Image (cartoon, helix red, strand yellow):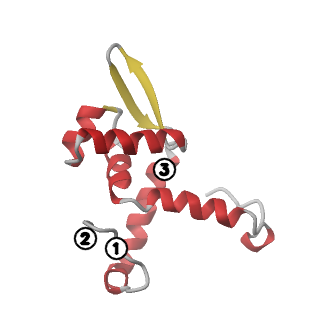
Amino acid sequence: MPAVASPPQANVAIHPLRAKFFRGLADPSRLAILATLIDSPLTVGEVVTATGLSQSNASNHLACLLECGLVSREQQGKFAIYSLADRRVAALIALADDVLSDHVAQLASCTRYATPEGAQ
């Protein structure tokens, strides 16, 4: 695992950007899209099928993820193919799942973090 360049408290300016990064990941639809792209690149239609999102909802979230640099897009004929822009996103999701598995009961009963509407 790569070493962190400086202790977190040494660079407090990074915290707002870090929070923004995690807010981007906090949406269940965006997480579902990222999870579907872990194994292979997909078209919007394939993302829709894999996630159950509507085409417009999936497209909007893909645009957000593209703008933030978490996914990349390659045009192949009339299809746009989306993939993870950085394989570390897959590792981050796997690490989150690992931590979650150790704290699922506490997180499920936590009242301080609101659950987004429609999420379980």
Whether 105 is drawn above or below 43: the answer is below
Point out the image quarter for the N terminus.
bottom right
Q: Earlier in the sequence, mark 1 or mark 3?
A: 3
* Element type where label 1 sits in the image: loop
Name the foreground residue: 28 vs 105: 28
In this rendering, position of residue 76 left or right of residue 20 = left
**Residue corresponding to mark 3:** 89
**Residue 25 percent across, percent down from the top left:** 45, 57
**Residue corresponding to mark 1:** 115
Tell me the CA gap for discs 1 and 3: 22 Å
Assess disc 3: are there few (<14), some (14-19) or many (≥20) residues with their C-alpha within 10 Å of its C-alpha: some
Whether 52 is drawn above or below 55: the answer is below
Taking the spot 43% from the left edge, 62% from the top edge, the residue there is 26
Q: Is label 1 or label 3 in front?
A: 1
Q: Are marks 1 and 2 in contact (CB under 8 Å)?
A: yes
Which label was assigned to residue 41? Answer: none
